[in-house]
Amino acid sequence: KSSTEIRTRIRALVREKDEEFGSSRNWTWHPDELQRLFTESTIHVSKPRLIAIFVDALDEGGRDVARNLAKFFHELDLAVVEAGGAAKLCISCRHYPIFFHDTHLDIYVELENHDDIALYFEDGLNPKSPIESAQALSNEARKMLRTEIRDRALGIFQWACLAIGLFQDADLNGQIVGHIRNQLKLVPPRLERSSQTHFDEALCHGFTQTSK
C-alpha cells in the first residue's frame, strides 16, 4: 500500500511537469526537488517495514558531488529515524574527508583484498597464460612479481588487474620481466580516473624503448 501511494505521488509530479513543460525532453529537475521527493518517499515506505538502500560508486560524479550526496544520504538516515522509520543505507565511495554522525559503520574493502589479489595474480600467470609460456617464470620471479603487484595495488583490485594485463601484453611484445617492472613503476599506486591512461602510456613507452 505504501509503495502504491508513492507511485501515485510520483505520477502526479510527472503529470505536473508534462502540463508545465510539455515533452519530457524539456523538463528540468532541480536537485533539491529530487532530494525532497526521495526523502518523502523513503520515510513513507520505511515506516511499515525495514528497507535497505545501496548506493554504488558515489564518487563517479566527482569529489564535490560525492561530498554533497553523501551528506544528503546521512541527513536522510537521520530524517528516517526521527520520523519513526527503519532503513539501512550502504554507500560505496572513495575516501573523501566527509564527517558524519557517529551511527555509521565504515567498511574498507581494500583492506580485505590482498589475498584475493595474490590468487588473481596466480590465475593470471597460470601455465596457459602468454607470459608464463613465453618467459617460464621461476618460482623466485613469480613470488617477486606477486608481492610487488599486491603491495603496489594497496588493496585496489582494479589496479592489480591492470598491472597483470600490463605484464601479459608487454610479454607478448618480447619485453623481459625486469624491463616490465621498471615500466610498472611509472604508474601511480593510487587508482584514479587516469590510471588506465598511465598503464597505456607505460606500456607504449616500454614498446618504444624495446624497439630502439
Image: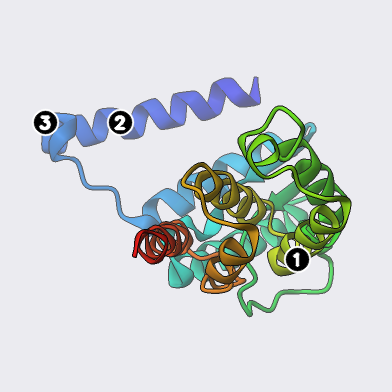
User: In the image, residue 25 lies at what x, y percent?
Assistant: 15, 34
184 relative to 202 in the view: left or right: right
206 relative to 86 in the view: left or right: left
Quarter of the view holding residue 22 = top left
Q: Between residues 84 and 159, which one lies in front from this camera angle? A: 159
Say the numbered circle drawn on residue 138: none
Q: Earlier in the sequence, mark 2 or mark 1?
A: 2
Q: Nearer the viewer, mark 2 or mark 1?
A: 1
Please give the residue where the numbered disc 1 appears in the rendered image: 148
Q: What residue is rendered at 45% in x and 31% in y? A: 9
Q: In the structure shown, which secondary structural element does the residue marked by tag 1 occupy?
A: helix
Q: In the structure shown, which secondary structural element does the residue marked by tag 3 occupy?
A: loop
Question: How many residues crowd around disc 3 within 10 Å: few (fewer than 14), some, or many (20 or more)?
Answer: few
Q: Nearer the viewer, mark 3 or mark 1?
A: 1
Q: In the structure shown, which secondary structural element does the residue marked by tag 2 occupy?
A: helix
76 relative to 83 in the view: left or right: left
Q: What residue is rendered at 80% in x and 42% in y? A: 122
Residue type, numbered disc 3: Gly
Dots 2 and 3: beta carbons under 8 Å?
A: no
Q: CA distance from mark 2 to mark 3?
A: 10 Å
User: In the image, residue 77 lies at what x, y percent?
Assistant: 70, 57
Whether residue 59 is visible, yes or no, is yes
User: In the image, residue 199 lies at what x, y percent?
Assistant: 47, 59
Please give the residue where the numbered disc 2 appears in the rendered image: 14
Q: CA distance from mark 2 to mark 1?
A: 54 Å
Residue type, numbered disc 2: Val
Q: CA distance from mark 3 to mark 1?
A: 59 Å
Q: Between residues 95 and 105, which one lies in front from this camera angle? A: 95
Please give the residue where the numbered disc 3 appears in the rendered image: 22
Q: What residue is rendered at 66% in x and 54% in y? A: 160
Q: Earlier in the sequence, mark 2 or mark 3?
A: 2
